[in-house]
Amino acid sequence: MGELWHSLRRGKAACLGAAILLVMVLSAVLAPVVAPHDPLQAEITKRLRPPVWREKGAAENLLGSDQLGRDVLSRTIYGSRVSLMVGIIAVLISGILGVVLGMVSAFQGGRLDALIMRIADVQLAFPFILLAIAVVAVVGGGLLNVILILGVTGWVSYARVVRSQVLSVKEKEYVEAARALGSRSLVLIFRQILPNVMTPVIVLATFNVASYMVAEASLTFLGLGVQPAIPSWGIMLADGREYMRAGWWMAVFPGLALMLTVLSINLVGDWLREYLDPRLRHTE
């Protein structure tokens, strides 16, 4: 832990990203405490209030209000819950599915390996966001469906990375020694192989959290994602595009929140890639 903290402190960009990400996570977890208003409470008499520093702004709505009089700050805070939940859960689903299929493909080989890789090749032929849009259009939107679709369609990158790593690791001397001593296949996988292929998986998962957050916002913006009853950054962006002249703050602040969160995750991911790979570590 000391080495981890020392490495993080040496990278200014990583520290900045970790600080922003920590604020976003805490605001999502503590949303009922830190949000000044109910994000779904509408008051038409307070519609399209500008931010507090502009003329006709009110301290009651620090970042203004939307077309229904709902507080933009509160909705932005609650929107972080949806984005982070979608990103994290979808990464867990796609990561577990991809790691399992990649391990099976590399360890078993033969026709099963060829079958899994050909399915992966077919899926890679379609752009990820277009594939997600097509599936959502068929099975319907909703928070649960978006999470499942992003998770199931994102397994390919994990499977290919894990397969290439396993093909290399399983020929190492310590794996051959364990096999010669009579270790079973499951023991070899979980004790010898899996711990040594997780570094690229962890780095890939970090970047994919940001990718899935953007994908969720894109699907919701197009009306194929989270339902309007749930505050999310994608819904706020979709609502704000019709009021860019009269209420630019409706889209600007959730857009900034999404940008900062994705940027912070990418900065932390870059640092994590350097920390976990000894060849990329900075030498003093």
Image: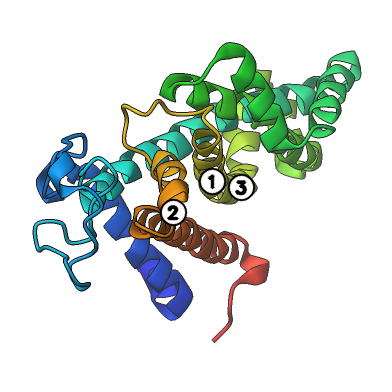
- Between marks 3 and 1 in the image, the one whose residue lies nearer the viewer: 1
Which residue is disc 3 drawn over? 204
Closer to the N terminus: mark 2 or mark 1? 1
Q: Nearer the viewer, residue 16 or 217?
A: 217
Q: Nearer the viewer, residue 177 or 210?
A: 210
Task: In the rendered view, tell whether residue 38 sits above or below residue 273.
Answer: above
| Kind of element beneath mark 3 | helix
Closer to the N terminus: mark 3 or mark 1? 3
Q: Is residue 121 rendered to the left or right of residue 279?
A: right
Q: CA distance from mark 3 to mark 2?
A: 19 Å
Q: CA distance from mark 2 to mark 1?
A: 8 Å
Q: Quadrant of residue 128?
A: top right
Name the amino acid, label 1: Val
Look at the image and tell me whether residue 1 can be seen: no
Disc number placed over residue 258 in the picture, else none: 2
Residue that lies at the very extreme toward the bottom in this rendered image = 284
Q: Give percent across and percent down for residue 171.
A: 81, 39
Look at the image and tell me whether residue 95 can be seen: yes
Q: CA distance from mark 3 to mark 1?
A: 16 Å
The C terminus lies in quadrant? bottom right
Q: Give percent across and percent down for residue 117.
A: 84, 26
Name the amino acid, label 3: Leu
